Amino acid sequence: MGLLQRLGASTYVTAGIGLLILAGVPATLDLYNVLQITVFVVMAILALSLALSWGFGGILCLGQAAFFGLGGYSYAVAVENMGDSTVPVLLSIAVPALFALALGYFMFMARLGELYVGVITLSVSLILFNFFNSAAGPDYVIGAAKLNGYTGMSSVPMINVPGFPNAVLDPNAMFYLAMASLIIVYLLCKIVSVSTFGRIVVAVKQNEDRAELIGYNSAAFKLGIFVLGAAIAGYAGCLFTNWNAFISPTVFSLGTTAQIIIWIIVGGRETFIGPILGAVAMQYLTTRLGTAGSIDTSLVFGIILMVFVVVVPEGAVPFIKRLVIRAANSSADHEATMPVPGSREETVQ
């Protein structure tokens, strides 16, 4: 059976819904709502990156914001020096991937435990936050790009049509790019999950010692899924930088890291659609609470996190799926026990 046949009908249904959203949003909503949905979509891509490495690969990465920020800064620095955005977009994927390759090599080849991997990745994210936060002044200039420290890089040139620097994408085109990217990344994650590589990753996740006894290099497979997640996060950072033509060290902050983890826990880290829905729902909630201005967003997020960890630890999507299956089975059992009209059981009754 081929990879595309293994994906299942639900994958194609989800992709089809994504295509309907891709076609319908700019045609039915105003510019403000298109911009808001665009950032929701970008954050959904970021959530998928952690769902791939943590939910699917079992690698507790508490520093996914590091790859997100590196992708954004790589794009911003490169595009200000090159003008055309084609190479900078590729660099926003390559730089975080290479950084993850170097970092992951030392972590996984050293056979560090899950807790240590989480601590190291979180520390790296905070180190990058402190570095970029203090990278102000004339000494922190890369070509024509000024890092500007905690104030960030503003007026970053937008993505253009490849080879045509003046043909910059407008907000609607930016939404099309972000939504198409989300669909492609979702399908990529699903393809990886049903591939031979993905099956070995799951085997390593479930029992690393047994996988090595069979002959698989567990460190190499963990490194592969870790690098792929970092590359996706870097691309999300590129899209985020384009969304508001700005990037600052806050992308590396502890708050950003915590938000990504909350999205995964709320949606369900054992799925790919769950993190997408979790990211969109939580970003929408953030927007609404920010508009109200009278409620502490961090407090609300903390309460939601505690509720899901205690009450719904598997996440919303697996929980709802389990309820639907239970209801369907209960209905089937009830119908199976009902007497057939004209049968002996009905006559006795």
Image (cartoon, rainbow, N blue to C red):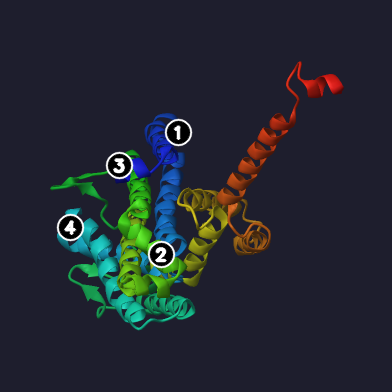
Cβ–Cβ under 8 Å for marks 1 and 2: no
The earlier-in-sequence mark between 4 and 2 is 4
The earlier-in-sequence mark between 1 and 2 is 1
Circle 1: residue type: Leu
Cβ–Cβ under 8 Å for marks 4 and 3: no
Q: In front of the other: label 3 or label 2?
A: 2
Residue named by callout 1:
29
Q: Is residue 154 visible?
A: no
Q: Is residue 197 visible?
A: yes
Label disc, if present, on residue 203 of the rendered structure? 2
The quadrant of the image that shows the N terminus is top left
Q: For the residues marked 4 and 3, what is the alpha-carbon distance in whole angstroms? A: 19 Å
Residue named by callout 3:
170
Residue at image position (62%, 62%) is 305
The earlier-in-sequence mark between 4 and 3 is 4
Q: Secondary structure at mark 3?
A: loop
Where residue 186 appears, as percent x and y from the top left, is 38, 48
Residue named by callout 4:
87
